[in-house]
Every structure is written in structure tokens, then in C-alpha cells.
């Protein structure tokens, strides 16, 4: 999912360089949303692992 957020971020940057304002804004919005979802899911998985007694990132 983080990969898709980075892809949309790059797409937004390229679109902004070439002057496509609407496409750049939409891509940036999608990238922000996907990054937020990724961060939330990562936090939930770390919390779930901690509650089960596993050390984080093990």
C-alpha cells in the first residue's frame, strides 16, 4: 500500500511540473489518503502484535 502512495505522489509531482493542476491535485489527494491508511494499518498491526506478546518487528 505504501508503494501505491509513492506512485501517486510521483504522478502528482510529474503532473504538477507539466502544469496539469487537476490531475496533480487528485493524485496528491489519493497519495495522502493511501499513506494515512498505511500508517493506521501499521499502527494497528504493531499494537496487535504487542498485545499478543510478540516483540515489535520480530
Image (cartoon, rainbow, N blue to C red):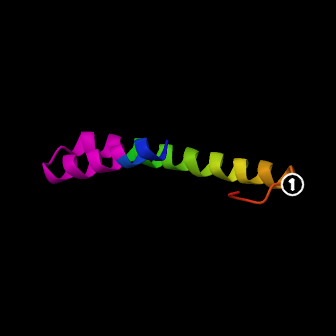
Provide the secondary structure element on which disc 1 rests: loop
Category of crowding for the residue at label 1, using alpha-carbon neighbours closer than 10 angstroms: few (below 14), some (14–19), many (at least 20): few
| Viewer-closest of 44 and 15 | 44
Residue 15 painted magenta: yes
Position of the C terminus, as image quadrant, is bottom right
Residue at point 12%, 49% (across, down) = 18
* Horizontal side, residue 17 vs residue 25: left or right: left
| Viewer-closest of 25 and 5 | 5
Q: Where is residue 9 in the image (x, y as percent from the top left)?
A: 34, 49
Please identify the residue farthest to the left as the structure is shown.
18
Q: Where is residue 20 in the image (x, y as percent from the top left)?
A: 18, 43
Question: For the stretch drawn in magenta, what is the main secondary structure?
Answer: helix
Q: Name the residue under label 1.
A: 53
Residue 26 painted magenta: yes
Residue at point 26%, 39% (across, down) = 23
The relative height of residue 43 versus residue 33 in the rendered view (above or below) is below
| Viewer-closest of 7 and 14 | 7
* Horizontal side, residue 44 vs residue 54: left or right: left
Residue at point 34%, 40% (across, down) = 26
Dividing the picture into quadrants, the one containing residue 4 is top left
Residue at point 68%, 53% (across, down) = 43
Please identify the residue farthest to the front as the structure is shown.
58
User: How many numbered discs?
Assistant: 1
The relative height of residue 15 versus residue 55 in the rendered view (above or below) is above
Magenta region: which residues?
7-27
Q: Position of residue 46 (x, y in %)?
A: 72, 53
Q: Where is residue 45 in the image (x, y as percent from the top left)?
A: 71, 47
Amino acid at each position: 500500500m505504501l508503494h501505491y502512495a509513492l506512485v501517486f505522489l510521483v504522478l502528482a509531482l510529474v503532473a504538477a511540473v507539466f502544469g496539469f493542476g487537476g490531475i496533480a491535485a487528485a493524485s496528491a489527494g489519493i497519495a495522502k489518503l493511501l499513506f494515512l491508511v498505511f500508517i493506521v494499518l501499521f499502527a494497528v498491526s504493531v499494537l496487535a502484535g504487542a498485545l499478543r506478546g510478540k516483540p515489535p518487528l520480530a
